[in-house]
Image (spheres, grey):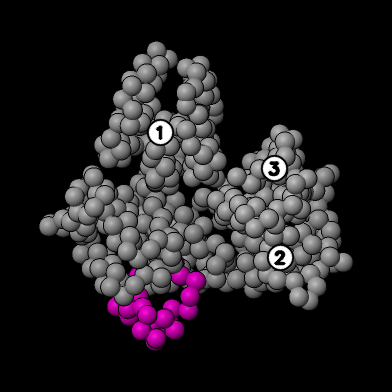
Amino acid sequence: MSIAILDPDKSIVDILTDLIGDMGESPCPFTNKDKFLGSIDPKSHNIAVISDDYTDVIEGTKQVYPNIEIVAIGFGDATACLNIGATHYLKKPFMANDIRQIISALLTSPKKQDHPDKGTFITADQSMKRILEIIHKVAPTQAPVFIQGESGTGKEIIARYIHKHSKRNAGPYVGINLAAIPDTLLESELFGFEKGAFTGAYATRLGKFELAGGGTILLDEITEVSLGLQAKLLRVLQEKQIDRVGSSSPISVDFRVIATTNRAIEDEIRDGRFRNDLYFRLNVIPIKVPPLRARKNDIIPLAMHFITKIALREQIGEKILTQGAKDTLTEYSWPGNVRELENAVERAMILTDGDQLSAENIMLGMDMNTAPEKTASVGTTIHEMERGLILSTLDHVDGNRTKAATLLGISIRTLRNKLNEYTEKGQFSDALSVKTSNGLPYNAS
């Protein structure tokens, strides 16, 4: 096994190469990200040191090869790199001993178990057990799977579970959220592009289908794709060939496809927003995931699973659910499904002292940071309610933006933008008492 290095500065790459070699390890240096992407392989590399000039490479490498530990280096935002998959972040210029200690720790630490959500299927509900039976029959085959269900029901968990139990589990699992990428960029993301195909295409780039070669590709929220791109997807699924943007010849690809949607597919087809022939190509094995409110027997087992997961991640003691807390969880309607349940458990774990979680510790829905007597009065604007929620959450976590963003269910960038907006409008006076984790006054910028 060797340690891959990617940095645009050759002098940095040379220094890291010598340093890693002096440690008795095998360095694999790159200054070109496309050469790096063409060579990176978990069978050859267990650690990758990547410059934050290539956040797309950090995110893509961790998504495709979750077992490769990534050390990000640079002058940028450490939190951003950690959020997209880096295990450690070192700000340049760093001491040689710092990188040595991190690499030594990664090399000597026991092999991490899979992330609790990656390949784990927690259920006590009969309808979900029937789905699990179908999955076990389907997983070893090459058949396309089409998963339908509301947002937050666990469609992506099912997709990962199918891949893990398939004959392709040694290959990559590549997921792409089709709703999160503008349609103008989606074709190049899926199929890749050739050098010079358009302004800014300085090097050939592999698309998601090629990255999924020998493995599984998840087309998440497939109903968000335009009709034009649907036609191209149909051809790829039929012929197992892709055309990179700017290429004149097709490339054969070997993949298994899993698609998901949170929409009523029958309505999409009837209204002409989704191609009938693409639906039949994808819908070989249909799986309809019921919402959490329809499988109440899963609520407590899932909550206990999340308690264990969060306790391990945050290095805190596990907590016990009181009967009152269990009743509160099972009686709630869970419009956000399993994702909302995990958020509720995480809030309770972080904000509750002691070793028990009671009904009072379970904050649900719009009540999560607002006591009944502080309910917004008539005339309060949505903007004011949002601002109050953000500032009170920051206050709860002593100004820690990472924890606040997690509790609020938004990204660090969104939180930062909101705070900057309040500062520019002179609406940040209420937060002057909020402190950062190091005890200093919070600065929105």
Q: Position of residue 193 (x, y in %)?
A: 23, 53
Q: Residue furthest top?
A: 22
Q: Position of residue 314 (x, y in %)?
A: 67, 40
Q: Residue at x 82, y 45 (%)?
A: 353
Label 2: which secondary element:
helix
Which part of the image, by quadrant, shows the N terminus? top left
Res 384 label = 2
User: What residue is disc 3 on?
Assistant: 442
In the displayed structure, does residue 122 sit left or right of residue 222?
right
What's under tag 3, amino acid-wise? Tyr
Q: Is residue 276 magenta?
A: yes
Q: Residue furthest left?
A: 248
Label 3: which secondary element:
loop
Q: Are marks 2 and 1 in contact (CB under 8 Å)?
A: no
Q: CA distance from mark 2 to mark 1?
A: 41 Å
Q: Residue at x 38, y 52 (%)?
A: 174
In the displayed structure, does residue 247 sit left or right of residue 153?
left
Which stretch is magenta?
A: 260-282
User: What residue is disc 1 on?
Assistant: 50
Q: Residue furthest right?
A: 373
